Image (cartoon, rainbow, N blue to C red):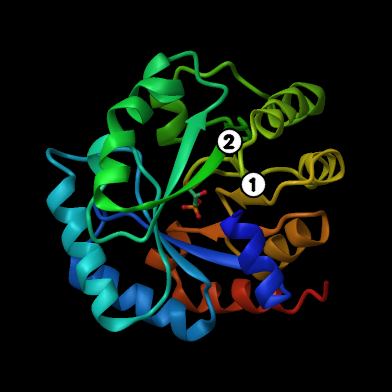
Amino acid sequence: MNVIRGWLKEKKEKLHFTLIDPDKQKPEKAAKIASICSSYGTDAIMIGGSTYKGDATPAIQQTIGLIKGVIDLPIITFPHSHTSLTENTDYVFFMSLLNSRNRRFLIEEQVLGSSVVRDFGIHPIAMGYIIVSTSKKKTAVEKLADLDVIKDDDIDKLLSYALTAQYYGMHCIYLEAGSGAEKPIPNEMVMAVHENLSIPLIIGGGIRDGKTARDKVEHGADVIVTGTIAEEKLDKVKEIIEAVKGYKL
Ligand code: 1GP
């Protein structure tokens, strides 16, 4: 079962996921943000971030626990490592950072986490994660990932990676510009991947307003992810969700 495709079919509209980084605020504040985004119509809460000071597991566990106490949306762990896995999550993006040169992000963390996913009964969503370098200033994930760089005009290179994910049998693709990126994934890239692949397409990084979100869904994005803007201007999240939901399939 392809979970994301199932949600798209069931809701008959494009989706919006809210990314919450447990390292950036206290669990109580995270739960408040999740609750407000839920009232605006977000479809799921993603929990994750690229860097953690110290042991991430307790903060993740507590953040998910408090969020589950206030809203009834699916929780998807967006792992920075196998230590992001907690028993109280619903789903995990079981993802490989396809354009990393570092074995850790390609396969090693996944091997460390697979039996944990089984033992905790977490539902894995197989995802091909591809980072596109859109901005002059490197984002946190770009600094970490030891990338085979895909520039924001290299559509052929991006397509080769994206097709690889589909041929591997992955259930979705996430095109990532990086949290807080100066520029989001360009429309041309969104459209090229949408036209060449049949699996759901998730777009995130640097989306800060409704118009940008709407552009991405009009060019073929199935899911829009926003993170930073919920920490800065919650009313913009409302605008973004309205723009995504206002798009008629
Ligand atoms: C990061 O794509 C997400 O993984 C969200 O990015 O924080 O820029 O919204 P922002």
- Seen from the viewer's position, the closer of residues 15 and 10 is 10
Residue underneath mark 1: 184
Query: What's the residue type where badge 2 is placed?
Result: Gly
Work out whether residue 163 can be spotted. yes
Q: Secondary structure at mark 1?
A: loop
Query: Quick check: 46 above or below 100?
Result: below
Q: Secondary structure at mark 2?
A: strand
Dot in front, 2 or 1: 2
Q: Residue at x 65, y 31 (%)?
A: 165
Query: What's the residue type where badge 1 is placed?
Result: Pro
Residue underneath mark 2: 128
Q: Residues within 10 Å of mark 2 (few under 14, many from 20)?
A: many
Alpha carbon separation for disc pair 2 and 1: 18 Å
- Seen from the viewer's position, the closer of residues 34 and 11 is 11
Is 62 situated left or right of 116 in this image? left
Answer with the quarter of the image where residue 177 lies: top right
